[in-house]
Image (cartoon, rainbow, N blue to C red):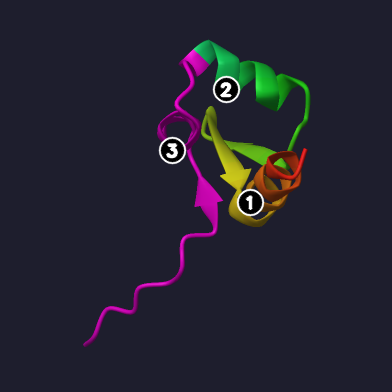
Amino acid sequence: MSTVMTEQRCYTVKDLQKILGLSRPVVYELLKRNEFRWIMIGGKYRISKKSFDEWLDGTADS
């Protein structure tokens, strides 16, 4: 039986902290402002990778 790895489709708050170099409260503020799509599963945020990447690409052009 082989294990198939799929492409990561969502980020965690910790992932965003590392990518953006921001503190946890600042990442939560971005989530609160609905800067990108997210869902909550088991009390933890999961951020849409596609939505986040599009947001980040859009802000990089500013």
Q: Quadrant of the N terminus?
A: bottom left
Residue 21 lies in the magenta-colored region: yes
- Residue 61 screen position, x and y as percent: 74, 45
- Residue 26 screen position, x and y as percent: 58, 15
Q: Which residue is mark 3?
A: 15
Query: Could you tell me how far apart the alpha carbons at marks 2 and 3 are, in whole angstroms?
Result: 10 Å
Q: Which mark is residue 8?
A: none
Q: Nearer the viewer, residue 41 or 35?
A: 35
- Residue 57 screen position, x and y as percent: 68, 49
How would you rate the neighbour count of disc 2 (Cα within 10 Å): few for under 14, some for 14-19, many for 20 or more?
some
Q: Nearer the viewer, residue 46 or 36?
A: 36
User: In the image, is 61 to the left or to the right of 40?
Assistant: right
Q: Which mark is residue 53?
A: 1
- Disc 1 residue type (three-letter): Asp
User: In the image, is 54 to the left or to the right of 9?
Assistant: right
Q: Which residue is mark 2?
A: 27
- Residue 38 screen position, x and y as percent: 67, 40
Residue 19 lies in the magenta-colored region: yes
Tell me what residue is drawn at x 66 percent, y 39 percent: 39
Which mark lies nearer to you, 1 or 3? 1
